[in-house]
Amino acid sequence: MNGKRSEGMKTKQAMMFLALAAATVMTACTSASVPEDEVKRIDKPQAEQEVLASTDTKETEEVKATEEKKSYSGFFYHAVTKNGEGDIYINMPSDEVVALLGEPESTFEAPSCALDGMDKVYTYDHCEIYIAEYPDQSLVSAIYLTDDLSSTPEGLTVGDTDKKMRELYGDPYKSDGYEYTYRKEDSYLRVQVNVGKVTYIYYMLKTE
């Protein structure tokens, strides 16, 4: 009897072991059907899409900013001040001037050289920038080089000869014997000459 009982217990134990093993296998199969790393892979494309969308937005903004900068045309003056530097164009908004060059050393009002009324004048190292006030914005109307430490991007400075001026810019658009005017897009470059020497250089809004 004891032998049969013992064999019966072994049979029950074997059946329990097989049932447990089958359950373990089923659980393992269920887990294997969607492993943790697979879940991560499923989620990854969405994360990548968010990163790509963010990157696309940033690139679009950078392209837009570049296109806006490229929209300026005509002559420009590369200003260098103790607070910053940059290319200043006629018709550039005044806030962009300040963003590039920093706050001016001083400001005052003066009769506009290009338009009717008064302009606000920003004083910086080696230059004065005239700002015309419009109803909806403030734009650069003129740029004066104030000493012989500043020069145009092409290399003309106060004290140079009129011969050098012509070598750099060619024949002027017009002249009246002492002031030579060069025209480019929506701007003028004007150079005053006295006894063959450059005495004054400034840029201004084209008015005709």
Image (cartoon, grey):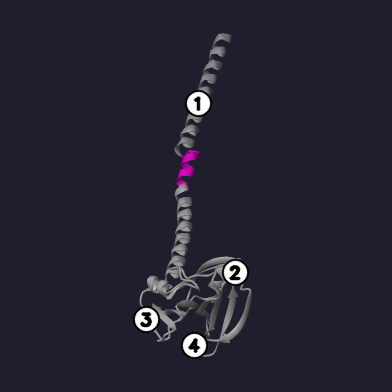
Magenta span of residues: 34-43
**Gap in Å between the C-alphas at discs 2 and 3?**
34 Å
Looking at this rendering, what residue extends furthest in the right direction?
Answer: 106
Upstream in the sequence, badge 1 or badge 3? 1
Q: Main secondary structure of the magenta part?
A: helix
Q: Are marks 1 and 2 in contact (CB under 8 Å)?
A: no
**In the image, what residue type sits under mark 2?**
Gly
Upstream in the sequence, badge 4 or badge 1? 1
Residue identified by numbered label 2: 102
Q: Secondary structure at mark 2?
A: loop
Upstream in the sequence, badge 2 or badge 3? 2
Q: Secondary structure at mark 4?
A: loop
The N terminus sits in image quarter: top right
**Gap in Å between the C-alphas at discs 4 and 1?**
94 Å
Residue identified by numbered label 3: 173
Whether residue 1 is visible? no
- Residue 21's disc is 1
Callout in the foreground (1, 2): 2
Callout in the foreground (4, 1): 4
**Gap in Å between the C-alphas at discs 4 and 2?**
26 Å
**Gap in Å between the C-alphas at discs 1 and 3?**
97 Å
Residue identified by numbered label 4: 115
Q: Total number of numbered labels? A: 4
Q: Is residue 40 magenta?
A: yes
The C terminus sits in image quarter: bottom left
**In the image, what residue type sits under mark 3?**
Tyr
Mark 1 nearby-residue class (10 Å; few <14, some 14–19, many ≥20): few
Q: Residue at x 48, y 58 (%)?
A: 54
